Structure formats: structure tokens, C-alpha cells
Image: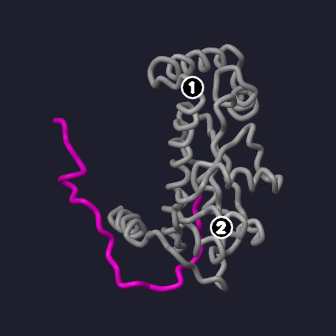
Amino acid sequence: MKERKEEIIKAYQFREATKEFLEDKKISDDDFEFILETGRLSPSSFGWEPWQFLVVQNMEIREKLREFSWGAQKQLPTASHFVVILGRKAKEMIPGSDYFKYIAKEVNKLPEDITKMREDVFGKFQNEDFDLTDDRKIFDWVGKQTYLPFANMMTAAAQIGVDSCPIEGFDREKIEAILRKEGVLDTDKFGVTAMVAFGYKKANLDWSKTRRDTSEVVKWVR
């Protein structure tokens, strides 16, 4: 158990926001499928899984994205794999939507009465508990959900020696327009919440991870 914990902490220490990758060193299919699987198996509120992972390997599309991605200038052309994290739009995330019915019936295999009860509970949560009462609030909440697999994939990558970089530095409206024009994004159903690049870093810099002390981060209520 101690060795396993040490391995996990070592992976967190290993992970850094890699700015540039080795262009000629690619992640194996098996390793990248493993990374994606940790995203797929990630938890989500009410189990709605309001995400999709768009793996952009087409270099021409990447170059188009680069123009409006100030935070991915070196990552887009060099990353072995580049993932655009998508979140479902508000109309998909309300009780009674076709997507909710699909999750309940086809994925969770729930009977109709349980589905109805679940949607009623979520409706209260959405409208009263968390005040998710307009499209922007709902999509912001969905964005929080997508950060669960987003983070898990980077941690899993670090555990097998794969580097990564989380990216928010981009013009979302223009990125969505490019992906829509390329026919790979249905903007009626999805919006972009983040990006993440994977590969092997170009240089091993002499650096150490800096974080606030545990005493500042953790507060116990005993």
C-alpha cells in the first residue's frame, strides 16, 4: 500500500504543464486508449456524463485552431494527441430531454418510474439547490463536470510517463466555429470547455513543483 501511494504522489509530482512536445515521439495506441478510458470512467453529477472527447489528429485542423489558441501555440503542432473537451449544451441537460432519456434507458437500464423520480430530484437540484436557471449557468455547471475526466486523464497519463498540458487559453467562439465548419462539432448539442495536449516533453527542465503548504490548503473541522 505504501509503495502504491508513493507511486501516485510521484505521478502528481511528475505532471507539469508541458509547453512543447517531441514531434517524432508518439503515444502508443494502447497507452492512449488507457488514458481515454480513465476519462470515460470518471464520475459525474447524477451520472449524466455530460461530455465528449474530440481527439484532433488532423494537422490542418490543428493549425486552424492554433490561430485562435494563444495558450497552445507550441502544443498544437507538436503534441502526439490533442483533445478538445466538449460539454453538453443547456437544452440537453434538463429533465425530460432526449439525452436524459437515452442515459436512463440505454445506458443505466432504468425502469420508467425510477427515471421519473431521478429527473424530479435533478429538477429540484437544478432549479432550487444550485440555481441552474439559465443556459449560461447550466453550461458553466457542465464545464465543472467535464473537468473531472479532464483531470483524471492527465493524472493517468502521468502515471504511465506521458506528459500533458491543460489549456484554457483560446477564443471559444472562434474555436467552436472552426470545428463546426469542419463538420466535427454539433454546436446545437455541445460547446468547448477546455483542451488538453498529450505527448512527451521536448526538454527536461530543472524545476520543482511549487504549491502552497498543506496548512494553508486544508482546514479541519473536528
> In the image, residue 136 lies at what x, y percent?
56, 33
**Which residue lies at the image location 44% right of the left edge and 85% below the top edge?**
204
Could you tell me the amino acid type at mark 1?
Answer: Asp
Q: What element does badge 1 sit on?
A: loop
Q: Does the magenta stretch include residue 106?
A: no
Q: Name the residue under label 1.
A: 134
Q: What element does badge 2 sit on?
A: helix
Magenta part of the chain: 195-222
Q: Which of marks 2 and 1 is nearer the N terminus?
A: 2
- Which color scheme is applied? one colour
Residue 125 in the image: above or below residue 26: above
> In the image, residue 151 lies at what x, y percent?
50, 55
User: The N terminus is located in which quarter?
Assistant: bottom left
Is 37 in front, or is 93?
Answer: 93
Q: Does the magenta stretch include residue 206?
A: yes
User: The C terminus is located in which quarter?
Assistant: top left
> In the image, residue 172 lies at what x, y percent?
62, 51
Q: Please tell me whether the stretch drawn in magenta is mainly helix, strand or loop.
A: loop
Residue 192 in the image: above or below residue 212: above
In the drawing, what numbered circle is on residue 66?
2
**Which residue lies at the image location 67% right of the left edge and 85% below the top edge?**
24
In the figure, is residue 162 to the left or right of 103? left
> In the image, residue 130 lies at what x, y percent?
46, 25
In the figure, is residue 210 to the left or right of 18? left
Could you tell me the amino acid type at mark 2?
Answer: Arg
In the figure, is residue 198 to the left or right of 33? left
Q: Distance between the residues labelled 2 and 1?
A: 31 Å
